[in-house]
Amino acid sequence: MLSYVVQRLLQGFVVIFLVSFATFGIMQLAPGSPVDILIGEAQVSQAQIDAIERKWGLDKPWYSQYGTWLSNIATGDFGRSVIRTGMPVSEMLLEAAPVTLRLNALSLTLSILIALPVGILAAVRRHSVFDYISMIGSTLGVALPNFWIALMLIIIFSLKLGWLPSYGTGGWRAYVLPVSVLAAEEMAILARLTRGATLEVLAQDHVNTARAKGLSGRAVMLGHVVRNSLLPIVTVLGYRIAFILSGTIVIETVFSWNGIGRLFIDSIYRLDYQVVQAIVLLLATIVVTANLLTDLAYAYIDPRIRLK
Amino acid sequence: MNTPRTALPVPGRGGTLLGDHGAGMGHHERRTERSRAWRRFRGYRPGLAGLVIVGLLIVIAIFAAPLAPYEPNGIQTRLRGDAPSREHLLGNDDRGRDVLSRLIYGTRIALIVGLGATAIAVTIGVSIGATAGYFGGKVDFALSRIIDTLMAFPTLALLITLAAVLGPSLVNVIIAIGTTIWASYARIVRADVLSLRERDYVLAARASGAGSTRIIVRHMLPNVLGPVIVLATLGIGSIIILESALSFLGLGIQPPNPSWGGMLSDGRAHIRNYPHIAIAPGVAIGITVLAFNLLGDGLRDALDPRQRG
């Protein structure tokens, strides 16, 4: 087990290092230097440009810039936004992170609370009306783009009915639409997975044994079926984090929530590449960490790996 | 999620449906295997429905010009934001352009991006996956870390960054999506090739002096084609959603080209005054994605029985 943990940790570090390299590399491909973007149409002498480049270290070769960037990040310094006149990127991230965290935590909780019971019930009542309706809903939830669902809900609940605000974060009402939209896709996928996992468990011998020895339906379900079908779901959740973070980018933009996702899009529009590369690296690190934790959790649960 | 695809021996006649070429299957047997797959495919009705809808979409995309009632970019200022009517079945957008005509032309863009990006992703993914799986060792280690790295990025974040760096255009959208999503192809091909490496017929081919390229292309790839086709079909749906998200954010297909995502972006901008603009493009995206997903499920049943879920 220990060697497995060490091996996975090392792999994780290698991947995060490669991610930082790739992110930095992509930003180097961007047309125009930050200085051009910063000065725009203004008349500036070459001496002034040189001064700006020196100030930001842009006169150094790329590997030296990369080295500085990476070692600064290691100390928690993500650099400063060249475009937004020297604001520390880490400050911007800290300001936006709680918004994103709230949005994602709420929608993930909502999707789990709804998807698991629906998936289990659909499996137990296989081929029932409930099963068909929930699976049609799940199929649609995967096929429809979440930002379109968002627009439709805005038309219905904000514009026609006037019940819920269409943007902003003020008050609990403002949470309803973004949280539900972001939850919809996860719900669709989780419900389908839960149904599949439950069907698989239901077909196993130990469930038949439990029934045969006279346990009540409820005891069989709770003690033998649900527990075993939830295990694969828990691990899948860890791997879904990359998709969830993709969703938050668009949804924060649609509902004008000042989270990491909107900051990212905003910085893309403004060509504020310091911020963009910090956010991409941050998101990828979250994904790698989540996958690592999932693998380790799975290894801990699975005796075949744990006892090796 | 999916059952792990490792070195499971395939039940029945060796390999996946498109023929275990290396095992020296005769023409006759290969045909029976193919017709068996078609029978399996026909047995899954949603898959057939998906096939029919995909066929219709292709027809719409090819014959967009005669099918569209109006010019997709024809601006009629006096019809700005008009609700659906008999002359304009889906109404007019914020510039008075016919929404139905734009929707029809949008099919073309969606399918071009879907197929183009898939072609790029399959080419890169299959080459890298096969190389990693066949050669193993250090090559495999290095390529696998590249695959891991790509998979660490939230797809949309990487895609948006690439699209912004490359600059928005149809070709760049296709390139950006293709180079972002190939890792999943590399993963399955690598695993399959790894499992095929020690098969007798591969050893026989090697013993008879066949080179690595020949062994990979002639003997291994035909056997991993089934899963790749299934994944590619299922992947087209997500590509179309990615493209529409990109265009919705203004980083994909540029106006006035009629992409579904771009139309949704117009719809969002004018949602208060002309809410009808935003409805149809989303339905079109939903139907297209659904059709490819159903077709993919059907193909999985037919081509890749191991994956049946």
Image (tube, rainbow, N blue to C red):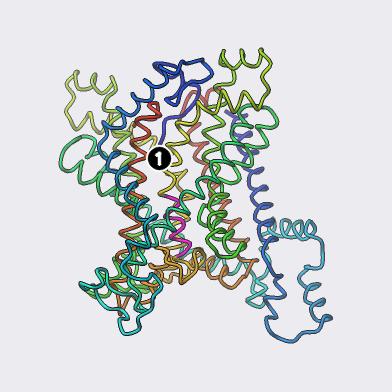
Q: Quadrant of the C terminus of chain A?
A: top right
Name which residue lies at 34% across and 75% down.
Answer: B93
Provide residue A260's location: percent of width, then percent of height. Answer: 51, 64
Secondary structure at badge 1 equals helix
| Residue shown at 69% from the left, 16% from the top | B209
- Amino acid carrying mark 1 in the image: Val
Q: Is any atom of residue A82 visible in this view?
A: yes
Q: Residue at x 54, y 56 (%)?
A: B159
The chain letter under disc 1 is A
| Residue A287 on image: x %, y % | 53, 48
Q: Magenta span covers which residues?
A: B238-247
Q: Which residue is mark 1?
A: A234
The image quadrant where one finds the N terminus of chain A is top right
Work out whether residue A172 can be spotted. Answer: no
> Magenta segment, principal secondary structure?
helix
Horizontally, residue A65 falls left or right of residue B189, namely right
Q: Quadrant of residue B294?
A: top left
Closer to the camera in the image, B282 or A170: B282
The image shows residue A224, relative to residue A89, as above or below, that is above
Is residue A161 positioned above or below A4 on the image?
A: below
Q: Position of residue A285 (x, y in %)?
A: 58, 51
Q: Is residue B161 left or right of residue A214?
A: right
**Residue B230 at x, y percent in the picture:** 42, 36
The residue depicted at 26 percent of the width and 27 percent of the height is A202
Q: Is residue B108 magenta?
A: no
Question: In the current view of this chain or complex, which residue is farthest to the right?
Answer: A47
